[in-house]
Amino acid sequence: MPRIRVKLLAPDADDNSWHVHLPTFVMIPNSVEPIIEGKVHANGVYPDAELTPAEKAQLTVEVEVPADECDKEGKLDKAKIRQKYRGQPRWDREEVLDDV
Amino acid sequence: MGFPARRRDRPNESQVSPRAEWYDRNPSKENIGYQGWHIAPHSETIRSQYTVPTGKKAFIGGAYASVLRYTVATLVGTAVIYLGIGAEPLVVVEHLNNTVGIREWGLGLPSSVMLEGDNASIKTADPSNGGLMDYQAGIAIMEFDA
C-alpha cells in the first residue's frame, strides 16, 4: 500500500473525530506533524486544545492507502477514486481531494 | 402413490442458479487494522477506515481490539478503542486502570454484510494525563461483487 502524507482534519459534520478525508486508509502511528507544545503531539490532538485556524490548517499525518486509488508514482488519483466510488456523494465529486 | 423425491434427486438452488455464491464473486480481503503506542492524552481520532466501493458488498467476519497500559498516567481517564460500521459499534473496549500490564480486550463476530458506501472504522481516544497505552485492533473484511 502506498504511503502518503495528508491533512489531519478537525471533527466536522461528516466525522465527529479527527480524521482524514479519504474513503479507505490506515494511519501510521507517531506521524502527526507539526508538534505544537501543549496542543498536538505525534499521535494526535490534546482533548482540550484550542487550535487556531492556522494551526489546524497545517496538521498532517501519514497514511497508507489502497494501491488502486493511486497512480503509478503512488500519488492519489482523483479519477480512480471517483470511478471506484462512483455515485457515492462524498467521494464521486470534483473536489474529492481538495481536503486531502 | 409414490415416495417423495429423495433429496439427492432434487437439484438444489446453487446447481440451477446462474449466480455464484458471494464468496465466489471476485472476492478480495480488505482487512483493516491498527497498532500503535500512544502517550495520552489525545482526542478521538479515526485511525483506520474502509469504505465499500460502488458495485461491491463486504462481509464482516470478525473484529478484535485491545488496549494495554505500558506506563502509568499522572491522572487516569478512560482510554477507548472503538470499532464500528457507520454509527453502529462492532467492538468497544474501555480501559480505566492505571496498573501497568493490564489489558482490556474485546472480540466481535458480527457476520454482517456492508453495502456499497458503508464504512468501517477504528477510532481511539484517551483523556488521561500522561501514560503510554498500546492499542491493537483489526476488522476482517471480505469484499465481493454485489
Image (cartoon, coloured by chain):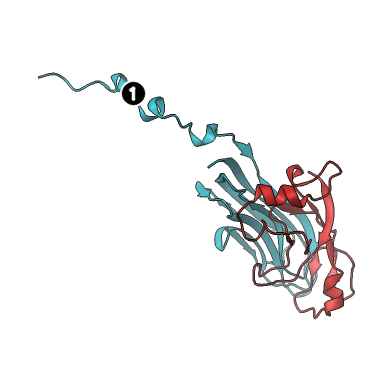
User: Tag 1, which chain?
Assistant: B
Give x and y (percent) for residue A42.
Answer: 85, 63
Identified at 55% across, 34% down, the residue is: B25
Residue placed most toward the observer, B3 or A79: A79
- Amino acid type assigned to the residue bearing label 1 in the image: Pro
Quadrant into which the N terminus of chain B falls = top left
Up/down of B128 relative to B18, above or below:
below
Identified at 82% across, 59% down, the residue is: A6
Up/down of B12 relative to A22, above or below:
above
Give x and y (percent) for residue B45.
Answer: 72, 65
Up/down of A26 relative to B72, above or below:
above
What colour denotes chain B?
A: cyan
Secondary structure, mark 1, is loop
Residue placed most toward the observer, A22 or A97: A97
Residue placed most toward the observer, B59 or B56: B56
Report the label total.
1
Residue A45 lies in quadrant: bottom right
Give x and y (percent) for residue B27.
Answer: 59, 36
Residue B61 lies in quadrant: top right
> Which residue was labeled with disc 1?
B11
Q: Is residue B104 visible?
A: no
Which chain did the image draw in red?
Answer: A
Give x and y (percent) for residue B132.
Answer: 79, 63
The crowding category of the residue bearing disc 1, from other C-alpha atoms within 10 Å (few below 14, some 14 to 19, many at least 20), is few
Identified at 51% across, 36% down, the residue is: B22
Identified at 64% across, 68% down, the residue is: A14
Q: Is residue B55 visible?
A: yes
- Using residue B85 as the reference point, say whether residue A36 is left or right of it: right
